[in-house]
Image (spheres, rainbow, N blue to C red):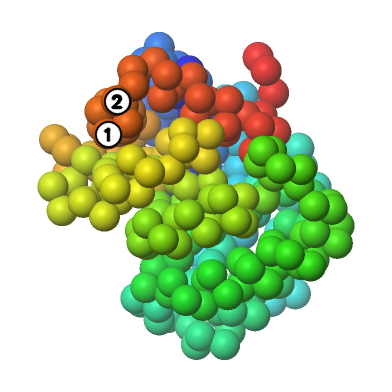
Amino acid sequence: MIIDTHAHYHSEQFDPDRDELLASLGPAGIGMVIDIAAEPDSLDRVMELAGKYPFIYAAIGLHPDEVGDLNEETLTKIREYLADEKAVAVGEIGLDYYWNRESRDLQISSFKKQIDLALEYDKPVVIHSREAAADTLEVVTEMYGEGSPWEMKYGRTPAGKIPRKGVMHCYSYSSEQARIYTEKLGFYLGIGGVVTFKNGKKLKEVVRQTPLPYLLLETDCPYLSPVPFRGKRNSSLYLPYVVQEIAELKGITPEEVVRVTEENARYLFGLPEN
Ligand code: NI
């Protein structure tokens, strides 16, 4: 089955037909979805969806644009939800220097604070990073690299084994950094519609070079529809286009892409065998 590891089905763009659309996923081969919080008021809506649908899981956290609201009240709510077994990750958290809605200092301190929560609740992180390559790598290295809080808690990962740390969602940086995130830091890369774009050359190269055991499928829906739906509202139903592109880039079958990325997602997020 296909697992969509990054969706925002709680968004208002799905208000007109949410239930109908979600009901159509299973028959189309989309077996599980992780719905990702971003704004403070999305926390309740994400958990509601995960409560309503057995195949939907939640990631709980505040997007870097929203960390001005990471106050005691919000933190209490995040903690409460992270104690729920349907919450399988902390996210999306990270740094966004494109919109720069909050100061860089506040973004960095809130990013670390939410990583601390992930360690406390034994959850992987879903990282959003836009135009913040250097600072993101610095924070992730500090928190997850050698001698990091992650290593203090879980110990060193044996060679050849991928740790359950997290995913660089909608990976958009260089091939060099992709190697560092995967081979050195043990992070997964989330691959979505951008890989089908004509101007997605950089990401195509990243996908070509990165071993399949480090890749996850994601939509970021309602955003980032793959070609030939670019610009339209995205949904998990379009993931086969992403699968096809990855298969072509790597010279393997689409079935292989689905099989391995499913395994990866189940392992990283601790999703049950059903
Ligand atoms: Ni997202």
Question: Which amino acid lies under the numbered mark 2 shown in the image of this protein?
Answer: Gly
Q: How many marks?
A: 2
Percent x, y of residue 25: 41, 21
Splitting the image into 4 quarters, where does residue 40 fall? bottom right
Q: Which one is nearer the viewer's eye here, 175 or 19?
A: 175
Residue 251's tag is: 2
Amino acid of disc 1: Leu
- Residue 179: x %, y % from top left: 48, 54
> Which quadrant is home to the C terminus?
top right
Q: Which mark is residue 32?
A: none
Which residue is drawn at the image coordinates 76% and 43% (left, top)? 158
Q: Position of residue 77 (x, y in %)?
A: 73, 60
The residue shown at (21%, 51%) is: 201
* Residue 249, disc: 1
Quick check: marks 2 and 1 in contact, CB under 8 Å?
yes
Q: Secondary structure at mark 2?
A: loop
Between 156 and 87, the one lying in front of the other is 156
188 over 259 or under it: above or below: below
**Going 68% across and 72% down the picture, which residue do you hit?**
142
Question: Does residue 222 appear left or right of residue 84 in this picture?
Answer: left
The reply, left or right, for residue 223 in relation to residue 76 is left
Relative vertical location of residue 53 with respect to residue 173 in this rendering, above or below: above
Answer few, some or many: residues within 10 Å of disc 2's Cα (few below 14, many 20 plus, some between 14 and 19): few
Q: Residues within 10 Å of mark 1 (few under 14, many from 20)?
A: some
Instruction: Relative to 98, say whether 80 is above or below.
Output: above
Q: Secondary structure at mark 1?
A: helix
CA gap, disc 2 and disc 1? 6 Å
